[in-house]
């Protein structure tokens, strides 16, 4: 099995999962299929059209004589009528519901192998929420024992099937962490997070969110995570943003049995909508029937059509999430979805507690602008990161000021031009401060914020005060001047000496992007900054010979180095910062400007974030290439498959 990240946003990723030569794009949903074709209400033709992977139950197959015979003789793919990837559950769900199953843990592993499933599941114990700690611990020990035995059996017998190692631990977050750590050591292929169904049924989304995060923190980043038993599309966006890659849905069929109609915003009863002229959906079912027509059909037909609709909307939401990941607007989609139920909003609000961890995975640049949708946006990783990176700038003398909310961004294009070597920090109600000289860099001019209420502004105030205290310690109180409102006197107040404002802008932008002073005083006098003749915007940074050092990328204003720029970065940034270290095998490829794959990476700056501009070096820190990292510092070490650095150029 291989798993590779193609696009990402928040902790969500679009991945390519290759199982037995069959490719699945994640995130995705696995429809739950009944192994008995007579009990399967949606046709396998439709399942084949929509799904690349399904999940069925090996325990029911094992216990039902005629199903077992077909599965053992012809294999699970023939029994189900599905050639693509088949995952099976082990009977754990039945164990959770009935308290017992009539199969031994190793027997069900052997059976799953025998019938040719692609991914089998251990017979884990789904401990319910809120049980006493003793029980949760005891059952977790048993799950871990079975997990170890299952892996040993697979290895000893050379089984082909891949295995799901389910994380348990009830609602004890430390037990979830322990479970994730221990499961990770055993080396499973996929990590489901188990026993969340009762929590989902009780709308305890906050508990589910905390369980996901506390598990994710200790699971390997290079393996897919499956949220077991979560089939309602309303929760997908948040779960994906927290790092879940796979979902399964029995909900599409179960809800249809009770005449329930799924939407990405919640569930409607057919009775509630039967007087509508048309369904609020354009799937093939909803565009062929009016609610009244559907309601008048016999029970069996109605159930089938509702299940089909439920399946269409479930996949539709997955596709919407994928598009949001590509656009860099997954948080915006999450913020939209969590407003569909206060309990979902509560779950989203808990994310704030873990934002330091989540920020490590959130890309440093996004295609779309940061949209503020409510007070929770204040705690998003983009905001947190900016507040941390503000401390990367070198300050000597600072003016703190505000500008009228009617002034457009980037500020420096709409305010009186300033030519000063003083740092002007413009107060911002969300981002704390926007330094005048870096005001074009993502997300400082790529955001939309509505008029805020005072209590929202208050949240920012604590940071502002803390930052000013930090600044006072750094440069002394005398070097900080609060000039209230931005005005043309800034020029008057400023140092008299003539400065190269654009060169200073580039210097500050590089400090912000890399945390080091790349353009020193000497270089300041040599570089030439080119602005576009048509738009007046920053375009390029040239050295004294007129050769390009950096290009300014138009959408986010990040500085993209040329070969010369990369050499300069390498000279100015100490090892291992901004480095991705590759082994000897990859050296020549990198020098030729070919992409760097994760399996060649032996070390890196662990603080790297996705989509940062990095230096590719060998173990002796010789510069080989430069490019954009797809993975963060944790993933670069853990992934052994797929693209790691998209190389822009190599050094021969
Ligand atoms: N289906 C829903 N929840 C679970 C779980 O915790 N374990 C297994 N194996 N299957 C499930």
Image (cartoon, helix red, strand yellow):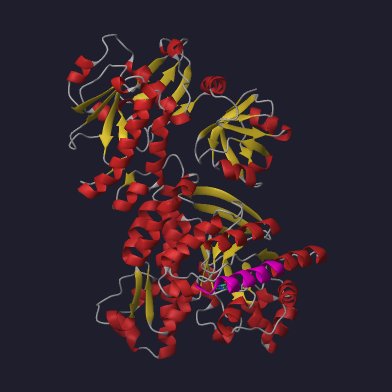
Image quadrant where one finds the N terminus = bottom right
Q: Is residue 385 above or below residue 416?
A: below
Query: What residue appears at the point 28 percent right and 41 percent down from the top-left corner?
Result: 461
Q: 598 or 139: nearer the eye?
A: 139
**Quarter residue 407 falls in:** top left
133 is within the stretch colored magenta:
yes
Residue 392: image location, x then y, percent: 43, 29
Query: What residue appears at the point 68 percent right and 61 percent down from the top-left corner?
Result: 20
Part of the protein shown in magenta: 129-145
Left/right placement of residue 643 relative to residue 439 reads right
Left/right placement of residue 259 relative to residue 641 reads left
Residue 207: image location, x then y, percent: 45, 65
**Quarter residue 645 falls in:** top right
Q: 52 or 150: nearer the eye?
A: 150
169 is within the stretch colored magenta:
no
Query: What residue appears at the point 36 percent right and 48 percent down from the top-left corner?
Result: 379
Q: Is residue 177 above or below residue 522?
A: below
Instruction: Point out the quarter of the image occupied by ligand 1.
Output: bottom right
Q: Residue furthest right?
A: 156
Q: Main secondary structure of the magenta part?
A: helix
Q: Is residue 239 above or below residue 616?
A: below
Answer yes or no: is residue 119 visible. no
Image quadrant where one finds the C terminus = top right
Residue 287: image location, x then y, percent: 34, 73
Answer yes or no: is residue 354 visible. yes
Count of marks, rendered view: 0
Q: Is residue 497 above or below residue 422?
A: above
Residue 153: image location, x then y, percent: 78, 67
């Amino acid at each position: 099995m291989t798993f590779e990240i193609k696009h990402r946003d928040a902790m969500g990723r679009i991945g390519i999962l290759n199982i037995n030569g069959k490719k699945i794009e994640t995130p995705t949903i696995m429809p739950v299929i009944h192994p008995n074709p007579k009990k399967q209400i949606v046709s396998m033709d439709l399942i084949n059209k929509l799904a690349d992977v399904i999940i069925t139950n090996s325990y029911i197959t094992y216990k039902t004589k005629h199903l077992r015979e077909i599965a053992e003789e012809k294999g699970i793919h023939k029994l189900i009528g599905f050639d693509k990837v088949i995952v099976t559950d082990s009977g754990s769900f039945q164990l959770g519901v009935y308290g017992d199953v009539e199969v031994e843990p190793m027997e069900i592993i052997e059976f799953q192998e025998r019938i040719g499933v692609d991914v089998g599941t251990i017979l884990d114990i789904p401990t319910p929420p809120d049980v006493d700690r003793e029980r949760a611990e005891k059952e977790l020990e048993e799950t871990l024992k079975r997990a170890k035995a299952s892996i040993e059996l697979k290895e000893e017998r050379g089984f082909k099937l891949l295995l799901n190692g389910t994380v348990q631990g009830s609602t004890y977050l430390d037990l979830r962490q322990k479970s994730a750590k221990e499961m990770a050591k055993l080396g499973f292929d996929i990590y489901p997070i188990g026993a969340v169904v009762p929590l989902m049924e009780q709308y305890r989304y906050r508990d589910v969110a905390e369980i996901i995060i506390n598990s994710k923190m200790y699971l390997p980043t290079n393996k897919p995570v499956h949220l077991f038993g979560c089939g309602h599309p309303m929760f997908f966006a948040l779960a994906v943003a927290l790092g879940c890659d796979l979902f399964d849905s029995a909900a599409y069929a179960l809800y249809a049995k009770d005449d329930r109609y799924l939407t990405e915003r919640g569930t409607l009863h057919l009775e509630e909508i039967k007087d509508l002229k048309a369904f609020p959906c354009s799937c093939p079912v909803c565009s062929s029937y009016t609610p009244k027509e559907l309601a008048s059909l016999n029970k069996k037909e109605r159930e089938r059509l509702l299940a089909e609709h439920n399946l269409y909307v479930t996949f539709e939401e997955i596709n919407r999430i994928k598009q949001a990941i590509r656009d860099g607007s997954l948080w915006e989609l999450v913020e939209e979805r969590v407003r569909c139920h206060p309990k979902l909003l509560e779950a989203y609000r808990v994310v704030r507690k873990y934002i330091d961890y989540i920020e490590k995975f959130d890309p440093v640049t996004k295609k779309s602008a940061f949209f503020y949708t409510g007070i929770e946006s204040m705690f998003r990783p983009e905001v947190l990161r900016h507040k941390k990176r503000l401390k990367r700038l070198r300050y000597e003398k600072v003016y703190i000021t505000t500008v009228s909310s009617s002034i457009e961004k980037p500020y420096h294009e709409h305010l009186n031009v300033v030519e000063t070597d003083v740092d002007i920090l413009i107060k911002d109600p969300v981002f704390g401060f926007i330094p005048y000289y870096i005001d074009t860099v993502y997300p400082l001019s790529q955001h939309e914020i509505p008029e805020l209420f005072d209590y929202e502004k208050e949240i920012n105030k604590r940071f502002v005060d803390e930052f000013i205290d930090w600044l006072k310690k750094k440069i002394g109180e005398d070097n900080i001047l609060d000039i209230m409102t931005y005005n043309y006197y800034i020029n008057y107040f400023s140092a008299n000496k003539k400065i190269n404002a654009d060169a200073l802008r580039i210097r500050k932008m590089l400090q912000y992007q890399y945390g080091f002073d790349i353009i020193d005083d000497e270089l300041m006098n040599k570089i030439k900054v080119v602005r576009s003749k048509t738009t007046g915007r920053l375009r390029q940074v040239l050295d004294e010979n007129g050769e390009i050092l950096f290009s300014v990328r138009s959408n986010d204003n990040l500085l993209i180095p040329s070969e010369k720029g990369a050499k300069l970065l390498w000279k100015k940034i100490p090892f291992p910062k901004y480095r991705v270290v590759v082994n000897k095998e990859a050296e020549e490829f990198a020098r030729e400007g070919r992409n760097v794959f994760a399996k060649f990476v032996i070390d890196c700056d662990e603080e790297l974030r996705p989509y940062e501009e990095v230096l590719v070096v060998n173990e002796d820190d010789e510069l080989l290439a430069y490019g954009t990292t797809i993975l963060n510092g944790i993933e670069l070490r853990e992934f052994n498959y797929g693209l790691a650095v998209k190389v822009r150029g190599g050094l021969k």
